[in-house]
Image: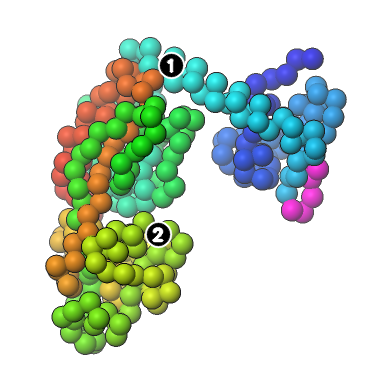
C-alpha cells in the first residue's frame, strides 16, 4: 500500500473544515482536486473515509479512527518544514505574515513596502484575519498579535502598547446629548463587536462594563465598525493613533484609555532563518510608530 502525504494532508483539511470546498480554499486547491485526493486515499486504504451529502463530508467510523494519527503526521511534517526553513541562509523566498484586520488592511501595506523595495527577492504573503494564526502548524512565519503569546515554542518580542479610545464623528455629536460621564453613554448609539470579546474585555479593564447587547450596531469585522464610526452612525472604539489623523473625529470620555499590547512572534525553530530575522527586525523598528503609514 503506497499512500501519499499530500492525500493525508487533504484528508486532515477536510476533517478540520468539514467540507471539500472549505478544505480546497485552505489548501489552495480546486474542489475536484480535493475530491480526487480523497478518492485515491480511500482506494489505497480499501475503505471509505467519508460519506458525502448536503451537510458536507461526514466521517465514517474507520475515518474517525484515523483522525488523530493524521493530525500527528501533519504536526511532524510542519516540524520538518520549520527546521528546514531555519537552516536556510538565502535572502530570498517567501515570508508569510499574519495580522488582524486593522493591521493587515490599514497599516501593514504601508509599512512593508519599504522592506520590499530593499529586498526585492523576498515575497510577502499577508494572512488577514482576527483569529490567531497557528505558528506551530506553519499557518504563518511571523505573527503580529495584540496580546502576549504564551505558547512555549514561540519566540515573542514586545513592541509597545496601543491606546484605544471612544470616538464619534462631529456630525453625530452635533445631533446628540453631550457626554460627561460613563452613564451618559446610555443615551447614545454604541458601535462594537458581536461575538469577538477582545475590545469589550479591554474596555472592561479600563472601567467601562460593555456588553454586546448594548451595541446598536454590531459587527465582528473591525474595518466595518471603524467605518461605521467614521460615517457618524454612533460612538465606537478606535485606535487613538489612527483617529487623530481623521477629519471630523472627536474623542469622547478621554479619561477612558484602555491599551492593547503589541507583539511580534515566530516559531523558535525558524528564529535563525536570515530572511525571517530580517523581516522581524524591520517590523520591530517600524511598528514602534505603527500609525505613520495609516491612510487618512
Q: How many marks?
A: 2
Question: Which residue corresponds to the image point at 22% horizontal and 59% vertical from the top-left?
Answer: 258
Q: Quadrant of the N terminus?
A: top right
Q: Secondary structure at mark 1?
A: helix
The residue at which mark 1 appears reads as 83
Q: Is residue 238 visible to the viewer in this orientation of the structure? A: no
Q: Which mark is residue 134?
A: none
Whether residues under marks 2 and 1 lie with C-beta atoms below 8 angstroms apart, the answer is no
Q: Is residue 107 above or below residue 89?
A: below
Mark on residue 197? Answer: 2
Q: Residue at x 49, y 20 (%)?
A: 79
Left or right of 64: which side holds 256?
A: left
Graded by Cα atoms within 10 Å as few (under 14), some (14 to 19) or many (20 or more), the crowding at tag 2 reads few
* Residue 204 spot, x, y in % from top left: 29, 64
Assess whether residue 52 is covered by the magenta stretch.
yes
Q: Nearer the viewer, mark 2 or mark 1?
A: 2
Please give the range of residues in magenta. Answer: 51-55
* Neighbourhood count class around disc 1 (C-alpha, 10 Å): few under 14, some 14–19, many 20 upward: some
Dot 2 or dot 1, earlier in sequence: 1
- Helix, strand or loop at label 2? It is loop
Residue 186: quadrant of the picture: bottom left
Depth check: give the residue in front, 229 or 92: 229
From the viewer's side, name the closer residue of 188 and 121.
188
Distance Cα–Cα, label 2 vs label 1: 35 Å
The quarter of the picture where residue 37 lies is: top right
Q: Tell which of 35 and 159 is nearer to you.
A: 159
Amino acid at each position: 500500500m503506497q499512500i501519499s502525504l499530500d492525500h493525508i494532508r487533504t484528508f486532515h483539511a477536510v476533517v478540520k473544515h468539514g467540507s471539500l470546498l472549505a478544505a480546497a480554499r485552505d489548501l489552495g486547491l480546486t474542489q475536484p482536486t480535493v475530491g480526487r485526493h480523497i478518492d485515491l486515499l480511500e482506494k489505497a486504504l480499501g475503505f471509505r473515509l467519508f460519506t458525502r451529502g448536503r451537510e458536507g463530508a461526514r466521517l465514517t467510523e474507520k475515518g474517525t479512527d484515523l483522525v488523530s494519527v493524521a493530525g500527528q503526521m501533519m504536526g511532524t511534517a510542519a516540524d520538518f518544514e520549520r527546521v528546514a526553513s531555519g537552516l536556510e541562509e538565502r535572502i530570498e523566498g517567501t515570508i508569510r505574515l499574519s495580522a488582524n484586520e486593522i493591521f493587515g488592511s490599514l497599516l501593514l501595506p504601508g509599512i512593508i513596502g519599504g522592506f520590499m523595495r530593499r529586498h526585492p527577492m523576498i515575497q510577502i504573503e499577508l494572512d488577514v484575519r482576527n483569529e490567531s494564526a497557528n505558528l506551530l502548524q506553519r499557518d504563518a512565519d511571523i505573527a503580529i498579535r495584540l496580546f502576549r503569546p504564551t505558547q512555549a515554542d514561540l519566540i515573542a518580542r514586545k513592541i509597545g502598547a496601543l491606546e484605544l479610545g471612544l470616538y464619534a464623528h462631529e456630525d453625530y455629536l452635533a445631533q446628540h446629548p453631550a457626554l460627561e460621564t460613563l452613564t451618559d453613554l446610555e443615551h447614545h448609539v454604541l458601535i462594537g463587536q458581536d461575538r469577538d470579546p477582545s475590545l469589550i474585555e479591554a474596555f472592561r479593564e479600563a472601567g467601562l462594563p460593555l456588553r454586546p447587547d448594548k451595541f446598536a450596531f454590531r459587527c465582528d469585522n473591525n474595518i466595518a465598525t471603524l467605518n461605521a464610526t467614521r460615517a457618524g452612525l454612533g460612538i465606537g472604539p478606535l485606535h487613538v493613533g489612527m483617529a487623530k489623523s481623521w477629519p471630523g473625529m472627536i474623542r469622547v470620555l478621554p479619561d477612558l484609555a484602555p491599551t492593547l499590547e503589541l507583539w511580534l512572534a515566530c516559531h523558535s525553530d525558524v528564529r535563525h532563518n536570515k530572511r525571517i530575522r530580517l523581516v522581524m527586525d524591520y517590523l520591530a523598528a517600524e511598528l514602534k510608530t505603527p500609525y505613520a503609514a495609516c491612510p487618512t
